[in-house]
Amino acid sequence: MVTRVTSVTSLGRNGLYDWLIQRVSAVVIGVYFIGMLAYLIAQPNLDYGTWKAFIGSVPMQIATTLLVLSVAAHTWVGLWGVTTDYLTSLTFGKSATGVRLVVQMVIALLLLVYVLWGLVTIWGGA
Amino acid sequence: MKVSIYRYNPDTDREPTMKEYDVDTQGKDLMVLDVLNLVKEMDPSLGFRRSCREGVCGSDGMNINGKNGLACITSLSSVAPGVKEGKKALVLRPLPGLPVVRDLVVDMTMFYNQYEKVQPYLQNSTPAPAIERLQSPEERAKLDGLYECILCACCSTSCPSFWWNPDKFLGPAALLQGYRFLADSRDNATEERLARLDDPFSLFRCHGIMNCVSVCPKGLNPTRAIGHIRSMLLERGI
Amino acid sequence: MSIRTITFDAIVVGGGGAGMRASLQMAQSGFKTALISKVFPTRSHTVSAQGGITCAIASADPNDDWRWHMYDTVKGSDYIGDQDAIEYMCSVGPEAVFELDHMGLPFSRTEEGRIYQRPFGGQSKNFGEGGQAARTCAAADRTGHALLHTLYQQNLKNGTQVYSEWYAAELVKDGQGNVCGVIAICIETGETVFFKAKATVFATGGSGRIYASTTNALINTGDGVGMALRAGLPVQDIEMWQFHPTGIAGAGVLVTEGCRGEGGYLINKDGERFMERYAPNAKDLASRDVVARSMMMEILDGRGAGPDGDHVFLKLDHLGEEVLHSRLPGICELAITFAHTDPVKEPIPVVPTCHYMMGGIPTNVHGQAIRLANGHEGQDQFVNGLFAVGEVACVSVHGANRLGGNSLLDLVVFGRAAGLFIEDALRQGMTQYEPSNDDIDQALSRVRRWDDSKGGESVASLRKELQSTMQNHFGVFRKGDLMHEGVSKLAELRERVAKAHLEDKSQSFNTARVEALELDNLLEVAEATAIAAEGRKESRGAHARYDFPDRDDENWLCHSIYDPLTKQLGKRAVNFEPKTVDTFQPKARTY
């Protein structure tokens, strides 16, 4: 019996939750971008002050925070899927688990940095 | 016409080769299995599975000019334009993604293992009546499009998710049978069945690309069945 | 030479409906049971059965009675079906069918939620007096598929040990002729193994591939009959071959009798519903031998259709698209694929096609194989250790002509009965007969013969010649001189097959070796058929002779018994003693 990957690193530890996370985060990302697009169309003569007031308003701060978290979660679930499809014993033999773990750690680290950076940008004031 | 067939005999060959045959079909629109039988008369060493020769036993699933199908109900004219006329070669390979035993014969153990994992048998803890368990025509209609599966493996071996994780992703065929019992009004093991499908791999590796639907020789729709199971899991989970 | 031995309480050879029902029974009771099948079990020929399983479950008609079913079956058999066995099958049937529902078989349903039953040929109410009955329980037109998959699923559940893609090559007997098990070859690796068991159950199915045109799967090569005959055991009523009225012309693919049950009918090239002339009451639902002969008469009289006038049509379009697609979806698919005809719009070209072997290894209702004390005559004796169920067996419930829907019932009832009997026998302690090394060597000799062959004719060409000989000399209508010629052709073929060549001697999944071993079996069945057909000098059921056109109850109201050692044809009495009902006396058979 071949066992090519294990599932311990999945986000929800459960298929349904991973699946839900990906759908919900996709909806958040979609709604955010449609809203943003609508705003940009409605404000043809946008200047920096208006933009800063808009993006710095508390509702937009909350929305952007949700966006950042959603992008991170979506990316994690998606790339977790990609790594467990392609970085397996089929391609890497015995070292597959090691390779996959390293790649997943790099992804996780990047996402963590991205989330922290995003939160600082959104809530950092200035 | 030209026929190109994947040949590999582990007793004698170090690696597989494609072997060309020239077959006289007398211009008839034969089934691919008929062509294979003609080749086997010339070269008895060619190995392939076959039984009913009418598309109900599921023995002769193979990859025909790039698409999985049953040799016995795939006519030359339906393979690709020019094949029947001999302008284009008929190319036969084993089902992709499973280990090759010999020539067009693959080792289906992984496929059958996944089928067994869905516990493909009716489970009902209530005592059986003296006659049949009653079921309305509407309840029975829910099994149409599910029970007809012939386990030919055309679908699962056309599914990339099954290629990459044949040990963990159940694959379209097994999931279709999983749903066949979830949908049966006579079965009451719904909770146990769903609980076993909830991990990130067994069902959720289906990304809905519908290769299974496009190759199924019986016209079944595993993707839809998987969607139904997902809805049941969702209802159960939240 | 010593080979690996694997020991079981019981082994079942053949993974079709009968074999899997038997193995299920024994696995459920915890005995160590192996199922040996040359194809993955759901690829067995039971999967092709379409119309249904005939049984008086009183769904379509609440007053239905298994005795009426018994009457139909006795009459259908042209009175050489054993009445004790038919009584057993028809009375136990409902229990066996309800079990199938409880196992999960997806039967079609009535508005009341009960199993849907459709009319089939040869069915009547009230002992032939009450008109057409509807007694065939159906899962659309895929009943065999649904049945076979359900039984496989139950075997999975109950932990039967399945040896899938293992080919049983020969019976192993001890010096006294007691059966000790079989020699089988793992097709994938080529390993040859002795399966030793207290009970060996043959469920190897039919042998329609002895004919050039047949509805049977390519795997139906009579392996069980072949093994039995080589072991010197007799076969019974082997001349009785059913030609199904509706095989798709040219392709041989079966079109279920259920089509006529649902209201379809046959027409000749002039569009005439000719069955009204041959069977004024039952018309298209007369029994299969009657319909097949009527079709052949139409064709021989020049009323066949097509450029060669060699087929008639099955008309279904008047039933409407909705009925066809809900009740006969598989038929619509097959007709489009193999006849390039959409039954919703046009009639399907059909011709009588070899379908079912009524004869086989004689057994009692428990599946115990029987031989006669002196080869082709004398007292019945049991063959210790050997059982047969399903098409390979001749219980006999089908006699000279099987009714549609009775084969699936035969499978489950007698598969179950043999399982129950063996369970009981094992509990009480069954003997394991021990073969000597010489006995095993003897059984291996045929496999070795092929492996040592160095030159000679090819398997494919000999098989073709055998099939056309059977087709031309032993078809729907038979004639003494033509059959005599056929018998000598087969004798000559036997010598050539003995010298034929297996070129490919590799081990891994060598299908050429399997086909060579199958050819030996085809030859055994063909020769037995030929000699028995020539020997039965009358017309009865499926056996119709120009030179003896009438039924001869004085001389031939009996089973034929073919002894392979002397190639003699003997007679064995038919059972006319049912336990709970009065005997059905032979009458003229009209529909």
Image (tube, helix red, strand yellow):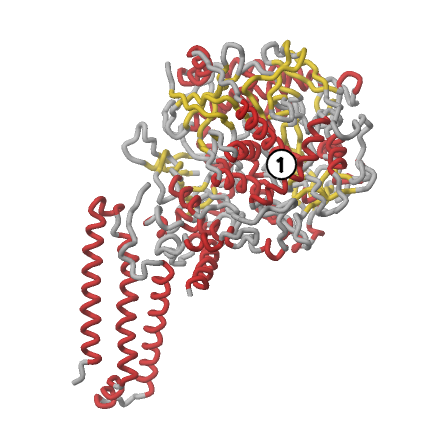
In front: A102, or C321?
Answer: A102
> Which residue lies at the image location 71% right of the left edge and 40% below the top edge?
C56
Q: Residues within 10 Å of mark 1 (few under 14, many from 20)?
A: many
Tell me if residue C537 can be seen: yes
Outermost residue toward the front in this view: C428
Q: Quadrant of residue C112?
A: bottom right
In front: C504, or C147?
Answer: C147
Image quarter of the C terminus of chain C:
top right
Q: Is residue B129 above or below residue C588?
A: below
Three-letter amino acid code at the position of disc 1? Leu
Describe residue B82's horizontal placement relative to residue C554 as left or right.
left
Report which residue position mark 1 lands on.
C408
Image quarter of the N terminus of chain C:
top left
Label tally? 1
Q: Is residue B119 above or below residue A73?
A: above
x, y percent for residue C93: 66, 37
x, y percent for residue A81: 30, 57
In front: B224, or C151?
Answer: C151
In front: C427, or A36?
Answer: C427
> Which residue lies at the image location 49% right of the left edge and 13% below the top edge?
C174
Q: Quadrant of residue B89?
A: top left
Q: Is residue A86 above or below residue C136?
A: below
Describe residue C588's horizontal placement relative to residue C383 as left or right.
right
Describe residue B5's horizontal placement relative to residue C114 as left or right.
left
What is the chain identity of the residue bearing mark 1? C
x, y percent for residue A48: 21, 88
Secondary structure under badge 1?
A: helix
x, y percent for residue C381: 63, 15
Tell me if residue B88 can be seen: no
Describe residue C109's horizontal placement relative to residue B207 as left or right.
right
